[in-house]
């Protein structure tokens, strides 16, 4: 059966629904070299979409929602040629401090690894989010470009 509703659907006097913006998704346009044993910000320089212009893809490479609320933040990263027993972390920073991370260890020499995670967080109008990567390879490695390395977020409808 189909029910057509004309007007506004309400729950106890409040309109039901909302928008899940601001929202954005960005990725690397080319490989980024990451030095060993230090946290390096990933420079997601290409936007797939940015509904409210809240992601800076050219200077700070950070998401500043500008609207208070809860946000689902997601990230993935692909790193080439990690040696046996080495590890890589992908950290989500909020206002300059790590609040969540994903980590993986290499199972064999020459492995390419992927780290993925999603995290829900409450933000005020001035909070900002960035992604940093760390590895202990012993030399520089490349984070792969394209959709394999991406960063995004959207406001959660409350």
Image (spheres, helix red, strand yellow):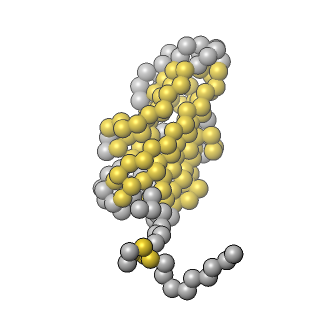
Question: Residue at (55%, 37%) from the top-left corner?
Answer: 116
Which part of the image, by quadrant, shows the N terminus?
A: bottom right
Viewer-nearest residue: 35 or 136: 136
Asked if 8 appears above or below 122 in the picture, the reply is: below
Residue at the limit of the structure toward the bottom, as seen here? 6
Q: Position of residue 84 (x, y in %)?
A: 59, 13
Question: Residue at (60%, 45%) from the top-left corner?
Answer: 29
Which part of the image, by quadrant, shows the C terminus?
A: bottom left
The answer to whether residue 103 is visible is yes
Viewer-nearest residue: 109 or 34: 109
Q: Position of residue 147 (x, y in %)?
A: 63, 44
Q: Quadrant of residue 15?
A: bottom left
Question: Residue at (65%, 21%) from the top-left corner?
Answer: 111
Viewer-nearest residue: 84 or 139: 84
Q: Position of residue 80 (x, y in %)?
A: 62, 27
Asked if 112 appears above or below 21 in the picture, the reply is: above
């Amino acid at each position: 059966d189909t029910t057509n509703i004309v007007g506004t659907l309400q729950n106890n006097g409040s309109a039901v629904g909302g928008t899940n913006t601001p929202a954005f998704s960005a990725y690397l346009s080319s490989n980024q070299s990451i030095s060993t044993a230090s946290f390096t910000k990933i420079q997601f320089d290409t936007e797939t979409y940015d509904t409210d212009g809240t992601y800076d893809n050219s200077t700070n490479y950070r998401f500043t929602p500008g609207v208070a609320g809860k946000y689902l933040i997601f990230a993935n990263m692909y790193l080439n040629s990690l040696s046996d027993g080495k590890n890589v972390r992908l950290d989500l920073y909020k206002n300059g401090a790590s609040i969540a991370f994903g980590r993986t260890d290499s199972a064999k020499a020459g492995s390419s690894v992927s780290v993925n995670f999603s995290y829900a967080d409450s933000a005020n109008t001035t909070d900002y989010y960035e992604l940093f990567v760390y590895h202990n390879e012993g030399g520089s490695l490349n984070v792969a470009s394209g959709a394999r390395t991406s960063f995004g977020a959207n406001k959660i409808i409350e």
